[in-house]
Image (cartoon, grey):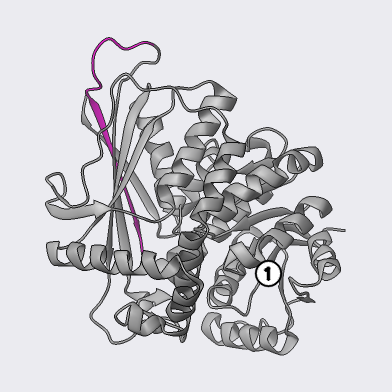
């Protein structure tokens, strides 16, 4: 069937409503067909009306597919009409698997913006074989989690020229001093249940990767719970997002499928010393509460209180979102040759990734461009199908070049040869 090149599932959600605007622009640029999908037709129409005002074009006649994640037949019908499904419905832990299953069974590629390692790795464990059999690509983490880190490490690898011994990422997010929340409730909810399901994740990983990666000759040492980053003149602490787990899955792919030496990964976030202390304190409280059903209920019902105002069920005010930007700096150390290395890594490569409006700008752009790559560059994706992290899936594609043209920029340089 496959009537539409791109179908936005969850188009009336917090993120999906913005994805509509980006898909419309992509359709004009590339001549692709598209539709919106969700369970409520009136809400879908309202989103299209709002988007029409923003883009200056009447989008109200855009095809609408009515489906619900609780109805597998309706999801199958949606998947049969799509070449690529852009899945915007989270938390994916609760609502993702049934969409992935529908896509894999009905021949539609699936791209999402999940930052949930438990979900991402479970999908690889459960659906990789069937996706290969059916020629379907399933690529998660195609938003702010974790395209900058993933494609950043691909850029480092290309600039290095040889083996990459280690990559460290340093994230800097600038949030304007404007009243209102700075984090989407869906992201907060995903983090709550991610902490709660950490034991399940350990079991998934043992099944997915029964063998450990080889021990590196030159080990990358973690920098500590709080430290001063001389390279970027800022205090920093470990970044607890999904980037590191996704990047390691990509390294697993390079090692197991291409017999390449795996790279060691560490991820950090830059912030003031005071914010480091505050984040550690809040993180301790958060992890304790997330470990218990009663605590999870408190966190979900009172996000504003427990996040000190950073999270709200009403979402992030548009003016604040528009001016919340990120810059990620990746430092890779390695060699300009491949094989056995008698000398420690001395070649240093830096890649800087920048984007605007983390939640509703850059993330939407990354999702849409990833979807277009699945649609237009299938021959450059690994194998004949499968469930992959974006760094491995898109390593040989033009995704970085596409993003550079759309305000998510990647710039690499050799710091030390």
x%, y% of residue 392? 54, 38
The magenta stretch spans residue 352? yes
Tell me the crowding category of disc 1: few under 14, some 14 to 19, or many 20 or more residues within 10 angstroms, Cα based. many
Residue 385's place in the image compared with 93, above or below, is above
Residue 357 visible in this rendered orientation of the protein: no
The front one of 389 and 109 is 389
Q: Secondary structure at mark 1?
A: strand
The front one of 185 and 179 is 185
Q: Which residues are magenta?
A: 340-356
Residue 238 visible in this rendered orientation of the protein: yes
Q: Quadrant of the N terminus?
A: bottom right
Residue 351's place in the image compared with 35, above or below, is above
Residue pictured at 71% horizontal, 90% vertical:
42
Is 407 on the left-hand or right-hand side of 256? Answer: left
Residue pictured at 11% horizontal, 45% vertical:
230
Residue 24's place in the image compared with 336, above or below, is below
x%, y% of residue 293? 51, 72
Residue 4 appears in which quarter of the rendering?
Answer: bottom right
Residue 282's place in the image compared with 261, above or below, is below
The magenta stretch spans residue 26? no
Q: Would you name the residue on which mark 1 appears?
A: 9
């Amino acid at each position: 069937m496959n009537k539409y090149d791109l179908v936005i599932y969850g188009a009336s959600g917090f993120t999906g409503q913005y994805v509509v605007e980006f898909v419309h622009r992509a359709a004009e640029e590339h001549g692709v067909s598209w539709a919106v999908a969700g369970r409520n037709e009136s809400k879908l129409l309202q989103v299209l009306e709002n988007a029409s005002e923003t883009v200056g074009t009447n989008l109200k006649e855009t095809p609408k597919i009515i489906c619900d994640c609780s109805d597998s037949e309706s999801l199958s019908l949606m998947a049969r009409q799509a070449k690529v499904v852009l899945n915007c419905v989270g938390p994916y832990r609760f609502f993702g698997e049934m969409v992935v299953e529908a896509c894999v069974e009905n021949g539609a590629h699936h791209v999402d913006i999940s930052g949930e390692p438990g979900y991402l790795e479970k999908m690889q464990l459960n659906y990789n074989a069937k996706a290969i059999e059916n020629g379907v690509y399933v690529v998660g983490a195609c938003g702010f989690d974790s395209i900058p880190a993933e494609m950043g490490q691909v850029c480092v690898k290309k600039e290095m020229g040889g083996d990459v011994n280690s990559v460290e990422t340093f994230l800097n997010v600038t949030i304007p001093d404007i009243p209102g929340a700075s984090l989407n409730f869906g992201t907060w909810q995903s983090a709550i249940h991610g902490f709660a399901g950490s034991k399940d994740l350990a079991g998934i990983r043992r099944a997915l990767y029964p063998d450990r990666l080889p021990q590196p000759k030159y080990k990358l040492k973690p920098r500590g719970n709080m430290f001063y980053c001389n390279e970027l003149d800022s205090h920093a602490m470990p970044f607890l997002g999904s980037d590191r787990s996704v990047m390691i899955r990509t390294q697993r792919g390079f090692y197991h499928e291409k017999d390449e030496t795996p790279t060691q990964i560490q991820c950090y976030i830059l912030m003031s010393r005071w914010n480091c202390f505050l984040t550690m304190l809040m993180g301790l409280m958060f992890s304790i509460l997330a470990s218990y059903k009663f605590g999870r209920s408190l966190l979900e019902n009172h996000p504003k209180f427990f996040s000190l105002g950073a999270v709200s069920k009403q979402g992030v005010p548009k003016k604040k979102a528009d001016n919340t930007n990120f810059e990620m700096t990746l430092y890779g150390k390695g060699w300009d040759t491949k094989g056995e290395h008698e000398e420690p890594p001395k070649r240093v490569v830096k890649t800087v990734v920048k984007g605007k409006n983390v939640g509703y700008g850059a993330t939407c752009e990354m999702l849409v461009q990833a979807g277009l790559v699945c649609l237009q560059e299938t021959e450059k994706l690994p194998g004949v199908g499968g469930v992959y992290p974006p760094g491995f899936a898109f390593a040989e594609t033009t995704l970085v070049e596409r993003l550079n043209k759309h305000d998510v920029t990647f710039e690499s340089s050799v710091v030390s040869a």
